[in-house]
Amino acid sequence: MLSNKTAVVTGSTSGIGLAIARAMAEQGANIVINGLGDADAIEAERAQIESDFGVKCLYSAANMLKPDEITGMVEMAEADLGSVDILVNNAGIQHVAPIEEFPADKWDMIIAINLSSAFHSMRAAVPGMKRRGWGRIINTASAHALVASPFKSAYVAAKHGIGGLTKTVALETATHGITVNAICPGYVWTPLVEKQIPDTAKARGITEEQVKTDVMLAGQPTKEFVTVEQVAGFAVFLCTDTAASITGSLLPIDGGWTAE
Ligand code: NAD
């Protein structure tokens, strides 16, 4: 379905981004993976994508804090794989603290990685998409693009910001065969989330099961984590022709969280 397309997925060395990269490769897209982590583990994931799906997969070490590296990642994909047809802005970090204690450098980092990086990558990728008359841009936002939670000022601001950026670029590209959408997941079961459970249980003096049900899933009506496969499947759907009229949308996949 996506053969002859190239997808650049930022923050795809783990979690949601890796699942999206693999799901797009499964549909035949060549892939650029990106993100931080152990070089050998990243090389193993890259090679695995090529051998599992018979596509080309390159790795870009671009740091999403650095605009010139982000532009370089798009240029590398265009030079080495021919185009950037699908751009998934997924890299993200979190920091949790009350506003009066929130470190200013964490604010700057979260705004840069979770919001500004998408500006820089879209700015670089949209001209090629316009020339070819086809493009799909998917921004991994969050339920926190739609509602807030306390102690997450930078994250919620960045995710609301990417919602506005998504709508704006969608309007600018609507007559060029390009769609721009934001996926807004609730709590997704990723290694990052899994790793927090033992420490949270210890800190709160509750069981690991209670961390899942009473802390993490308290606001998620299904009482189920969203899976990375569900998010990845949704991202693939947005790349189909059936989804061509979906643009400028903030699309929850949150077990009912934002319905409340
Ligand atoms: P994760 O930590 O597993 O993945 C984050 C990815 O971003 C990793 O590949 C990491 O290397 C990369 N990254 C971080 N800083 C970077 C930088 N400076 N430059 C390049 N890459 C960088 O987390 P995840 O849970 O898979 O989250 C992925 C996205 O989904 C994020 O934008 C996050 O806000 C969003 N999200 C996650 C959840 C959830 O519950 N897990 C819910 C809603 C939204």
Image (cartoon, grey):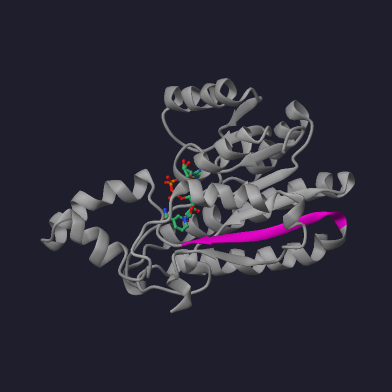
Residue 14, above or below 165 = above
**Residue 62 appears in the picture as rendered:** no
Task: Report the front residue among 32 and 120.
Answer: 32
Number of numbered tags placed on the structure image: 0
Q: Quadrant of residue 99?
A: bottom left
Q: Quadrant of residue 179?
A: bottom right
Chief secondary structure of the magenta portion: strand
Percent x, y of residue 206: 13, 61
Q: Residue at x 67, y 56 (%)?
A: 119
Task: Report the front residue among 188 and 147.
Answer: 188
Percent x, y of residue 235: 61, 50
Taking the image as shown, residue 80 lies to the left or right of residue 162, namely: right
Q: Residue at x 66, y 37 (%)?
A: 73
Residue 55, above or below 159 = above
Percent x, y of residue 34: 56, 37
Taking the image as shown, residue 24 lies to the left or right of residue 186, namely: right
Single out the residue that lies furthest toward the left: 205
**Residue 213 appears in the picture as rendered:** yes
* Quarter of the N terminus within the rendering: top right
Q: Residue at x 67, y 46 (%)?
A: 87
Percent x, y of residue 198: 19, 50
Task: Report the front residue among 98 and 103.
Answer: 98
* Quarter of the C terminus within the rendering: bottom left
Q: Quadrant of residue 115?
A: bottom right
Q: Which residues are magenta?
A: 176-185
